[in-house]
Image: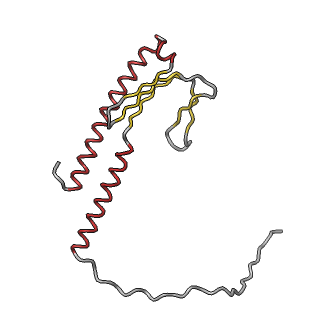
Amino acid sequence: MSDTAVVTPTASTAQLPAVQAPAAPSAPPSGAAVIQNEQGKANSLLNTIADKLDRLVTLTVVTAIADIDVVQDDPNQVGFTCRPKSGTTIEAFQTQVNLVTGDIENLISRDFATNTAYHSLTEFHLAQVTKSSDIVSTNLKAIRDLAVQISGRPS
């Protein structure tokens, strides 16, 4: 025995919206309008890039020591996330560099700063800060050069 649903159409008293006739075709845009539109698109792209660059003012490098859980994000993809185990102590060294002002802020947990076993990790962390800063500088210069090239302005 199977269940079957029967749908009976019913009349509706609701009014359907009036159908409008299609608009008459307009003349193709002039050459000046096309150029202005393309310039508008380029300016929009440059504004979007400028907005993103404004948000990229802080470089953060973190070196942390903790018991971690490794979680595979998606079983069908390569990739995983490391998370500190619940309730575990985290020893860390964090450096933030403001790429506009050049201000540098270091936050170091007490054990990370005083435990001689972490000395090589401190050197590693500082090398990562230097390397990251160099990479960011190179990337920002490449983005700037691209923006200048797109805008057509001399550098």
Residue situated in front as seen by the camera: 49 or 7: 49
Q: Position of residue 19 (x, y in %)?
A: 51, 87
Examine the image and state in which quarter residue 128 appears: top left
Residue 113 vs 71, above or below: the answer is above
Examine the image and state in which quarter residue 3 appears: bottom right
Q: Position of residue 87 (x, y in %)?
A: 63, 26
Query: How many numbered tags mark residues here?
Result: 0
Residue visible at 69% across and 86% down? 12
Residue visible at 37% across and 32% down? 97
Q: Report the residue that reaches farthest toward the right.
A: 1
Examine the image and state in which quarter residue 152 appears: bottom left
Would residue 7 be found to the left or right of residue 35 on screen?
right
Residue 42 vs 119, above or below: the answer is below
Residue 45 vs 131, above or below: the answer is below
Residue situated in front as seen by the camera: 68 or 46: 46
Q: Position of residue 26 (x, y in %)?
A: 32, 84
Would residue 65 be found to the left or right of residue 122 on screen?
right
Q: Position of residue 90 (x, y in %)?
A: 55, 23
| Color theme of the render | secondary structure
**Quadrant the N terminus occupies:** bottom right
Q: Report the residue that reaches farthest toward the left.
A: 154
Residue visible at 74% across and 82% down? 8
